[in-house]
Image (cartoon, rainbow, N blue to C red):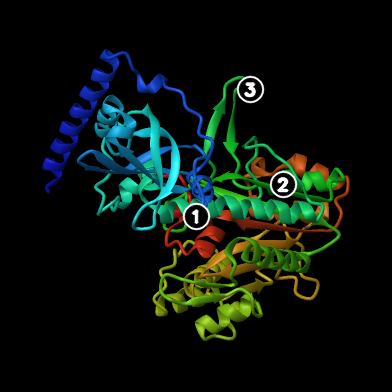
């Protein structure tokens, strides 16, 4: 069927369904004002069936009509709710002529409540023998065609509600998302971490190197920014004496769209006093192990290409510089001049912006040639100090910082630091980062540090990327209910 004829058919069906709604209203019934409170979900109702016993208890369920087969004086139908599907059976001489005629006129997509007793059909399916039903919402537009479902990816993301109606895999993925976030909260709370909320609107966007979204605060007559990171306010709380805090919240970065990037994304950030980046290693490993045990039931995750990620074995640890040297085949890479690095990157077929700074060239190599190969869990440690001004400088190598990036499934899942708590060093590193743009420095955060922050470890976990890995999704849009689209 062509797109034009499909559109015409949809318009015709809309007109037919609208006519049915007018007919009901003319007869004194408005489905949008009907009331019905189900006593059971579909799964709960099915669980009440007793083999070889009288099933005379009345069950009461509600959901969307997904199957509707008229067979003379009987009708088999199926409704879908949050717990699954349940079959309904309507018989004309039991339901009555008027109610049976109304049930016969229902359309796929209608939402109804139903009451009746349970029985098992000859094919062994537990079914509700209808005693009564009530139309609760009239679906004026038809659902996607049964056998082909919703296959257009743009429509899946733009009309997520239809994807959720038609696609059990999609529904299950978002159930998993909810359960995983709930598991993370329990895990941290059991370890005495306190969940907090920090400002989304900020006068200085700090905690990361990213382009912010800008808005204007009319009452104050100045620009504010949607936060790009949670970090700086959470560390103020360490100063205040809350020595174990976490936040699960939205960050916003005014950057591109890709399979692994959405401008609005969810982060977990965790800060713990009196530990360091190695303490964060233990924490993230225990957290992912807990998710595997409680939610997934396995520590072996199969990727779409068939590769299995083993989360239960040894997690590799490798230094950033060693990985970059291996990738370039040059053990002296970090002593090369900027021009030599640009030339070598070109020889490797890596497109590098010639305006990049020295450390950014190395990081381009890492992100394009190293990170995609890190499928199994790998702690990449001791990154160049220029990449993060908020971490402690390594005691035996002042060119690096005490950090790790946990890479799994070819992408960064969680960076973590031994947090910089020396206010003088922090100011120097901020100044080096912002250059002449001194107004981008968060002076209030520096003032907080000057009052004394305990030594601490901090970690950020990209929830959406974690979900890509844990659910086997291929695109960040598959784990965000309503992703940003062009």
Q: Point out residue 390 in the picture as x, y percentages from the top left corner.
A: 72, 56
**Which residue sits at x=72%, y=52%?**
186
Distance from Cα at disc 1 to Cα at disc 2: 64 Å
Which of the two marks, 2 or 3, is nearer to us in this view? 2
- Examine the rendered structure and indicate whether residue 378 appears above or below residue 246: below
Position of residue 388 relative to residue 111, above or below, is below
Viewer-proximal residue, 204 or 75?
75
Q: Residue at x 77, y 51 (%)?
A: 189
Which residue occupies the foreground of this view, 72 or 362? Answer: 72
Q: Secondary structure at mark 2?
A: helix
Nearest the viewer among 245 and 368 is 245
Mark 1 vs mark 2: which is more N-terminal? Answer: 1
Q: Which numbered mark, 3 or 1, is in the foreground of this view?
A: 1
**Circle on res. 232:** 2
Q: Residue at x 62, y 68 (%)?
A: 406
Q: Say which quarter of the image contains residue 29.
A: top left
Residue 431 sits above or below residue 318 on the image: above
**x and y percentages locating residue 175 in the rendered image:** 52, 51
Pointer 3 or 1: first along the chain: 1
| Nearest to N terminus: mark 2 or mark 3 | 3
What residue is disc 3 on?
A: 220
The answer to whether any part of residue 208 appears in the image is no
Q: Is residue 175 left or right of residue 159?
A: right
Report the side of 259 relative to 150 (left or right).
right
- Secondary structure of the residue carrying tag 1 is loop
* Residue 455 screen position, x and y as percent: 85, 58
Q: Which numbered circle lies on residue 52?
A: 1
What is the C-alpha distance between the residues marked 2 and 3?
22 Å
Look at discs 1 and 2 and give the one toward the viewer. 1
Query: Few, some or many C-alpha atoms within 10 Å of disc 2 (few <14, some 14-19, many ≥20)?
Result: some
| Residue 75 visible | yes
Hey, which quadrant is residue 134 in on the image? top left
């Amino acid at each position: 069927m062509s797109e034009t004829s499909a559109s015409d058919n949809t318009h015709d069906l809309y007109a037919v369904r609208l006519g049915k709604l007018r007919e009901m209203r003319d007869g004194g019934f408005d489905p949008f004002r009907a009331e019905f409170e189900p006593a059971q979900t579909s799964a709960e109702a099915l669980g009440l069936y007793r083999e070889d016993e009288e099933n005379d208890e009345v069950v009461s369920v509600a959901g969307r009509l997904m199957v509707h087969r008229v067979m003379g004086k009987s009708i088999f139908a199926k409704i879908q709710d949050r717990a699954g599907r349940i079959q309904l059976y309507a018989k004309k001489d039991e339901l009555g002529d008027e109610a049976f005629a109304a049930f016969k006129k229902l359309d796929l997509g209608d939402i109804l409540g139903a009451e009746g007793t349970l029985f098992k059909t000859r094919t062994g399916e537990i079914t509700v023998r209808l005693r009564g039903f009530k139309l609760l919402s009239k679906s004026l537009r038809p659902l996607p065609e049964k056998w082909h479902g919703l296959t257009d990816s743009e429509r899946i993301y733009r009309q997520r509600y239809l994807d959720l109606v038609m696609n059990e895999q999609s529904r299950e993925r978002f159930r998993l998302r909810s359960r995983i976030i709930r598991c993370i909260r329990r895990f941290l709370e059991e370890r005495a971490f306190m969940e907090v909320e920090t400002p989304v609107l900020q006068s200085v966007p700090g905690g990361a190197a990213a382009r912010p979204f800008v808005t204007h605060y009319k009452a104050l007559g100045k620009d504010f920014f949607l936060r790009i990171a949670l970090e700086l306010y959470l560390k103020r709380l360490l100063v205040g004496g809350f020595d174990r805090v976490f936040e699960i919240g939205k960050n916003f970065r005014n950057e591109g769209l890709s399979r692994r990037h959405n401008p609005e994304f969810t982060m977990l950030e965790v800060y713990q006093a009196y530990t360091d980046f190695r303490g964060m290693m233990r924490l993230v490993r225990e957290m992912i192990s807990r998710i595997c045990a409680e939610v997934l039931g396995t520590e072996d995750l199969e990727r779409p290409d068939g590769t299995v990620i083993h989360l239960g074995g040894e997690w590799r640890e490798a230094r950033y510089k060693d990985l970059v040297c291996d990738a370039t085949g040059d053990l002296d890479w970090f002593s090369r001049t900027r021009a030599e690095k640009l030339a070598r990157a070109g020889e490797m077929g890596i497109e590098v912006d010639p305006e990049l700074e020295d450390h950014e060239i190395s990081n381009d190599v890492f992100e394009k040639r190293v990170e995609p190969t890190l499928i199994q869990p790998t702690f990449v440690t001791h990154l160049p100090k220029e990449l993060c001004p908020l971490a402690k400088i390594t005691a035996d190598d002042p060119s690096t910082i005490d950090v790790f990036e946990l890479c799994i499934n070819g992408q960064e899942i969680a960076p973590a630091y031994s947090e910089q708590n020396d206010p003088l060093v922090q100011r120097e590193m901020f100044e080096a980062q912002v250059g002449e743009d001194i107004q981008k420095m968060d002076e209030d955060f520096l003032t907080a540090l000057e009052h004394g922050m305990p030594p601490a470890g901090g970690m950020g976990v990209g929830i959406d990327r974690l979900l890509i890995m844990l659910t086997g999704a291929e695109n960040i849009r598959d784990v965000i209910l309503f992703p940003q689209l062009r």
